[in-house]
Image: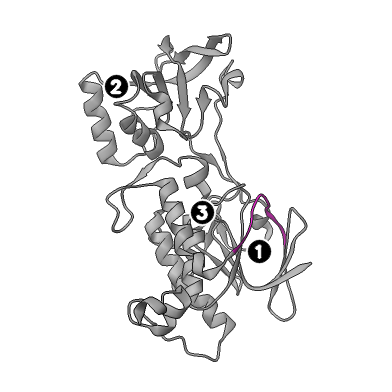
Amino acid sequence: MTISTDVVIIGAGPVGLFQVFELGLLDIHAHVIDSLPQVGGQCAELYPEKPIYDIPAYPVIGAQELIDRLMEQIKPFKAEFHLKQTVTELSAQENGRYCLRTSEGQDFDTAAVILAAGLGAFQPRRIRATGAEAFEGDTIRYKVTDANHYRGRNLVILGGGDSALDWALELNERAASITLIHRRSEYRAQPASVKKMKQLAQQGKLTELQGNIKQVHGTGGQLSHLDVLLPGGDVTTVPAEEVLVFWGLSPNLGPIADWGLDIERRQIGVDTERFQTNRPGIFAVGDINTYPGKKKLILSGFHEAALAAFGVRQLLHPDKKVHLQYTTTSPVMHQRLGVADSKK
């Protein structure tokens, strides 16, 4: 059965979820498609316990908690989710609408498509060292699902970005020891995090090492140590009971790359008024888009989602002027949010 709708959102990460909210405020119903078995995107799949410090009004909020609160926020709008599937086909119709088909054979007839797919269908970059495969999913992991699991353990963290540094700092008081291994001395993480890590290293509370993993050792399913190739060519041994790998994601836009969109370095060009792509009716918000001054922040994605919603509203009703209404005072907004009775 073909589903007819106003909007299909591709991607159920934080920006995709907030897009549901902004559309709902304008009385636009959405269907959401995501390749993962649960909503939340990277936040839920890769670092559900990661602390986030730059969400307005929250000095700190866990990634999964952010997703949970976004899901609570969009309840009034009854979005319909189609998980564990990807969009495999997109074609334009003569009436200006689009036909989409998913990997599960579900067809959509939609006026607008909003790409909120982050880096696309992603997978964490895996460790390829000799012997690593036997420990993956057990003592070699690519996300933290339970921070207390590492209490009292000899932990090695691989990577030089925000996730690696954030968890090195977060788990420092729980793990028996932490060794942070990065292939070079320069880090991609926030300078404040790098500074804190360096201070811990100077205090002997953390070991910082530059090098590449050559081989993983263990017996009976128990990880014991890693062989690390140092920049000078020597090999050193690092004790390890647990390994966390944060080498980023392997982005793959998949079929999106063949939709005739303006793509630059695996990112989709948009305007900054509506965040519409070069194809009318197709919008892009969050990490998947690019424009002058683009910053890959969840906060930026929320702003983009708000303007994209107004762009979709204009597309659906080109002859009607869209009046900005405030959620604090508008009876219409209260009705849509389901709080009208509480305001009486």
Q: Give yes or no for residue 88 being in the magenta stretch.
A: yes
- The mark that comes first in sequence, 2 or 3, is 3
Q: Secondary structure at mark 2?
A: loop
- The mark that comes first in sequence, 2 or 1, is 2
Residue 13 numbered tag: 3
Q: Is residue 286 left or right of residue 33?
A: left
Q: Secondary structure at mark 1?
A: loop
Residue lying at 56% horizontally and 86% vertically, measured from the top left: 317
Q: Is residue 31 left or right of residue 51?
A: right
**Badge 3 amino acid:** Gly
Residue 338 in the image: x percent, y percent?
46, 74
Q: Secondary structure at mark 3?
A: loop
Do labels 2 and 1 touch, CB within 8 Å?
Answer: no
Q: Whole-Å distance between the Cαs marked 2 and 1? A: 49 Å
Task: Give the main secondary structure, helix, strand or loop, of the magenta stretch.
Answer: strand
Q: Give yes or no for residue 320 being in the magenta stretch.
A: no
Q: Whole-Å distance between the Cαs marked 3 and 1? A: 24 Å
Which label lies toward us, 3 or 1?
Answer: 3
Residue 344 in the image: x percent, y percent?
35, 82
Q: Whole-Å distance between the Cαs marked 2 and 3? A: 33 Å
Relative to 147, residue 18 above or below? below
| Crowd around label 3: few <14 · some 14–19 · many ≥20 (10 Å) | many
**Badge 1 amino acid:** Gly
Snapshot quadrant of residue 175: top left
**What residue would you read off at disc 2?**
206
Residue 67 in the image: x percent, y percent?
46, 52
**What residue would you read off at disc 1?**
260
- The mark that comes first in sequence, 3 or 1, is 3
Relative to 195, residue 98 above or below? below
Do labels 2 and 3 touch, CB within 8 Å?
Answer: no
Magenta extent: 80-89
Q: How is the image coloured?
A: one colour
